[in-house]
């Protein structure tokens, strides 16, 4: 099993918080005997959540190579969601999911969210706001994120954690845009600004902050000072200019393009066909 799992390691079998889910196919052989065929597995760990709950984190999902691309990974994920809901854990997370698993996870979550009525009004309001156009840079991010009540409803009922729901929210808005080409420029700009804020920190309160190395007897990574000028801009004597700003913008645009492509792929798989 470890051969097929990237970056995997054996679990501690004496730890009662580990749970192993096996996907078994029952078959009858030529002699009429029942055989159990292992198709895949999922390993999950239960973390304590204050005061009397737990969080279920998927550590590994594996479908053995002969049975991949047949929907078994999706089935395992749906089973774990059913467990999370039936046992009322706080939420379900995945530890460092690979791109393909993240794609499958988002497809599963979007299908569940499309029929989850408590958030439909909030989705419709966000879509309507985007369709108005001429979005202000200061308010577009705030107005197009889900309200706190929607985040909590989704977590409590569907066990989708906040980080994953925010990713799904962008897909839900995209699905609501019709005709999508008419509003695509504004939508991409929103994705770009959100990505810039997440990666670089622009408009997130970090403007003007500077990190300055300080010599000390401790390690280099632990020896620094941070300051912020009164005006929100770095003082000229210690301003650190990013020599690779052009490359940074190029990489940022690449991330935006990849995110938009990912959103489109998910929408094509799960959304009703557009007339």
Image (tube, rainbow, N blue to C red):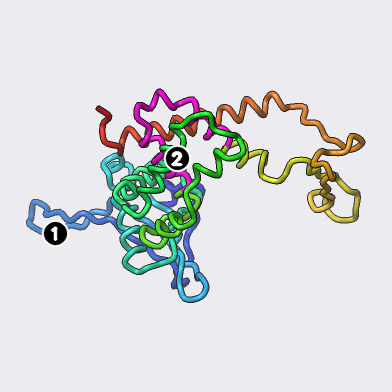
Asked where in the image residue 87 lies, by quadrant, the reply is bottom left
Residue 155 visible in the picture? yes
Front residue of 86 and 132: 132
For label 2, the residue is 170
Q: Is residue 196 above or below residue 228?
A: above
Q: Is residue 52 magenta?
A: no
Residue at x-position 82% and y-position 46%: 228
Q: How many marks?
A: 2
For mark 1, does the 10 Å Cα neighbourhood hold few (<14), some (14 to 19), or many (20 or more) residues? Answer: few
- Image x and y of residue 249, in percent: 65, 27
Q: Is residue 110 above or below residue 11?
A: above
Residue 34, numbered label: 1
- Image x and y of residue 59, in percent: 46, 56
Residue at x-position 34% and y-position 52%: 77
Marks 2/1: CA–CA distance = 47 Å
Q: Is residue 180 magenta?
A: yes
Q: Secondary structure at mark 1?
A: strand
Residue at x-position 62% and y-position 38%: 138
Residue 47, numbered label: none
Front residue of 164 and 234: 234
Q: Give left or right: position of 180 versus 67.
A: right
Residue range highlighted in magenta? 166-193
Say which quadrant the C terminus sits in. top left
Tag 1 or tag 2, which sits nearer the N-term? 1
Q: Secondary structure at mark 2?
A: helix
Asked where in the image residue 28 lies, by quadrant, the reply is bottom left
Asked where in the image residue 171 lies, by quadrant, the reply is top left
Q: Is residue 260 above or below residue 90?
A: above
Q: Is residue 51 above or below residue 136?
A: below
- Image x and y of residue 254, in percent: 56, 27
Whether residues under marks 2 and 1 lie with C-beta atoms below 8 angstroms apart, the answer is no
Mark 2 or 1: in front is: 2
């Amino acid at each position: 099993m470890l051969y097929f799992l990237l970056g995997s390691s054996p679990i501690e079998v004496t730890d009662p918080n580990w749970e192993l889910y096996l996907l078994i196919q029952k078959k009858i052989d030529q002699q009429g005997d029942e055989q159990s065929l292992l198709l895949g597995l999922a390993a999950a760990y239960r973390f304590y959540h204050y005061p009397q709950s737990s969080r279920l984190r998927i550590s590994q999902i594996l479908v053995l190579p002969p049975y991949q691309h047949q929907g078994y990974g999706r089935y395992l994920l749906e089973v774990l969601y059913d467990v999370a809901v039936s046992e009322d854990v706080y939420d379900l997370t995945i530890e460092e999911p690979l791109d393909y698993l993240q794609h499958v996870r988002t497809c599963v979550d979007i299908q569940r969210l499309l029929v989850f009525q408590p958030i439909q009004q909030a989705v419709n309001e966000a879509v309507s706001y985007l369709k108005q156009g001429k979005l202000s840079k200061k308010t577009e991010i705030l107005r197009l994120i889900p309200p706190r009540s929607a985040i909590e409803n989704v977590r409590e009922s569907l066990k989708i954690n906040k980080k994953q729901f925010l990713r799904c929210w962008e897909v839900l808005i995209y699905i609501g845009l019709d005709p999508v080409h008419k509003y695509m420029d504004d939508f991409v700009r929103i994705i770009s600004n959100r990505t810039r804020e997440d990666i670089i920190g622009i408009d997130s309160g970090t403007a003007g902050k500077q990190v300055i190395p300080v010599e000390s007897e401790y390690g280099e990574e632990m020896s620094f000072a941070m300051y912020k000028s009164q005006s929100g801009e770095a003082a000229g004597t210690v301003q650190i200019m990013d020599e690779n700003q052009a490359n940074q913008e190029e990489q940022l645009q690449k991330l935006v393009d990849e995110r938009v492509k990912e959103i489109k792929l998910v929408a094509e798989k799960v959304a009703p066909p557009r007339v």
